[in-house]
Amino acid sequence: MDFLKPRYTPMNRRRRIYEGKAKVLYEGPEPGTLIQHFKDDATAFNAKKHEVIDGKGVLNNRISEFLFQHLNDIGVPTHFIRRLNMREQLIREVEIIPLEVVVRNVAAGSLATRLGLEEGTQLPRSIIEFYYKNDQLNDPMVSEEHITAFGWATPQEIDDIMALAIRVNDFLSGLFLGVGIRLVDFKMETGRLWEGDLMRIVVADEISPDSCRLWDIKSQDKLDKDRFRKDLGGLIEAYTEVARRLGILGENEKVQSGGPRLVQ
Ligand code: UDP
């Protein structure tokens, strides 16, 4: 009686396109689409530090959905189509540009170390940096010269990426300021989206407390992945607080950990 069974593709039989540290990409339901699955894995220092934090993937899926949907709504193009379930979203397949684009408003992390600035110093203006995505090389910082010489992106594409980065930064800074959070810095990725013969650069990957520094304006508490990097504890509580302030979760609501899980 096989025909009575619901038709669905079990998780472990979907074609896995790529597995990263915190996410997995599966083939999507239609050509040109993919499914982005958020895992609970937290890594830092190029995966030298690793932990599974129950519920992190569910929170990042919701927070990233919220931010990407709003970016789409204000006309900043992204790969995001819609959220599918607790851990997964439907996205457009793009050709990822192998750069991590970091935008900084306040000195912290590697910038504070590199230039000997005190953490928390407001920068004279927002600064954009590029890092070459390569784990073996520890994601080295690169300049526009390197990017164009090695063909990772053209000068026109770099201009487009920087214009996108500034729009995303202005939007996110204002959004977080409105809920009492300071956007210190964040990392974004971009990709080439092909529509026939036309190509445009869109924001890709995720934007979540895993890829931003978010400080509570009143208490200065860190509400981001630095809680894991610096062993401060309370990561889920911090990410839940971000989700609550953004209105994604109700006052007393908690995310249910769970949702479809990866079969190892
Ligand atoms: N970041 C990220 N992925 C990386 C490196 C950095 O999401 O592989 C984010 C990080 O969370 C922070 C910003 O980019 O919001 C700037 O990070 P920084 O260069 O200070 O590096 P870190 O101190 O995190 O090593």
Image (cartoon, helix red, strand yellow):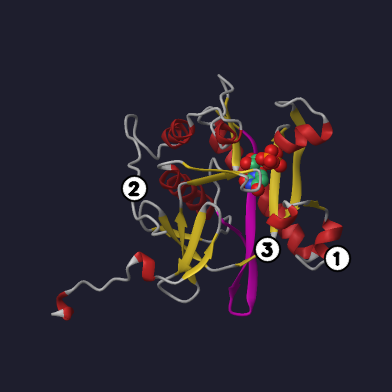
Q: Residues within 10 Å of mark 1 (few under 14, many from 20)?
A: few
Q: Measure how far apart labels 2 and 3 are at the Cα level.
A: 32 Å
Residue 35, x across and y down, in percent:
45, 64
Q: Which residues are magenta?
A: 183-205
Disc assigned to residue 127:
none
Q: Say which of 43 and 122 sits in front.
A: 43
Question: Which residue is under mark 3?
Answer: 97
Question: Which residue is under mark 2?
Answer: 258
- Depth check, mark 2 against mark 3: the one in front is 2
Residue shown at the point (44%, 37%) measured from the top left: 243
Is the residue marked 1 within 8 Å of ligand 1, measured from its CB?
A: no
Report whether 53 appears left or right of 181: left
Name above or below for residue 198 compared with residue 149.
Answer: below
The amino acid type, in three-letter code, at marker 1 is: Ala
Q: Measure how far apart labels 3 and 1 are at the Cα level.
A: 15 Å
Report whether 246 appears left or right of 197: left
* Residue 75 quadrant: bottom right
In primary-sequence order, the first of circles 2 and 3 is: 3
Residue 186 in sight from this viewpoint: no
Is 184 part of what is drawn in magenta? yes
Q: Residues within 10 Å of mark 3 (few under 14, many from 20)?
A: some
